[in-house]
Amino acid sequence: MSGERIVQRGLYFDEIQEGAVYAHSPGRTVTEADNVLFTTQTMNTQSLHLDAAWSAGTEFGEPLVNSMFTLSTLVGLSVAQLTQGTIVANLGFSEVAFPAPVRHGDTLYAETLIAGKRRSTSRPHQGIVEFHHTARNQDGTVVATAKRSTLMQVSPEALAAEGAAEGAGGAVTERPTSGGAA
């Protein structure tokens, strides 16, 4: 036994492969309790999420899962594999869509395309990554998509290697300790 301690984490900026698609496991089965709890905690009193009798009269015939729960789950499914302990901040979301409803009992599966990445100009020890997330249900139907921009840490190893290169006559990069735009 080596005694080495290995801590689960996401990927650092320099470990993320642009153009790669990461399939996230496990999936997440959504229950009625999940939907009611999330909906009431977020003060969303939409009858379509809370009132089974009212929802029975809609074109869906039953309550639907709150789309913000779906979005949160979509991003959450990616965390362990991509950003656990390596993200600095979410910078924003765009092009969020819900092409099909999620119902109680559906199981959500997610994957993420790395659409782009670049080093931050104002925070050179960090990088910006654009994730394109997709959620599918158990039948393979796309139920949510979102583009998300994040600020990610560069690995200590990459920063050390860059520092060694700088010491050997490479370009000097200023590393701010706080503040500044990404």
Image (cartoon, rainbow, N blue to C red):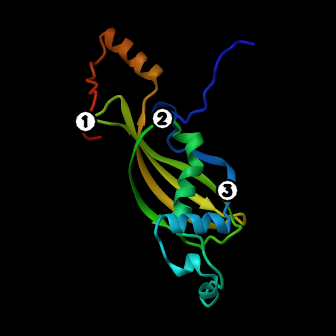
Residue furthest bottom as drawn: 57
Q: Which residue is mark 2?
A: 86
Q: Residues within 10 Å of mark 2 (few under 14, many from 20)?
A: some
Q: What residue do we see at 49% from left, 67% from top?
A: 97
Is 76 in front, or is 21? Answer: 76
Q: Residue at x 25, y 35 (%)?
A: 179
Residue drawn 30% across the image and 40% down it: 182
Kind of residue indicated by mark 3: Arg
- Secondary structure under tag 1 reads loop
For residue 30, what is the image quadrant? bottom right
Q: Position of residue 130 (x, y in %)?
A: 43, 48
Give the CA separation, mark 3 to mark 2.
23 Å
Q: Earlier in the sequence, mark 2 or mark 1?
A: 2
Out of 87 and 20, give the one closest to the viewer: 87
Place residue 171 in its image quadrant. Answer: top left
Counting from the top left corner in percent of width and height, residue 168 is at 33, 8
Give the distance between the C-alpha atoms of the residues marked 2 and 1, in whole angstroms: 18 Å
Of the image marks 3 and 2, the number of the one nearer the N terminus = 3
- Of 127 and 28, the residue lying toward us: 28
Give the residue at mark 3: 28
| Mark 3: secondary structure | strand
Work out whether 173 lies above or below 12.
Answer: above
Earlier-in-chain disc, 1 versus 3: 3
Label 2 sits on a secondary structure element that is loop
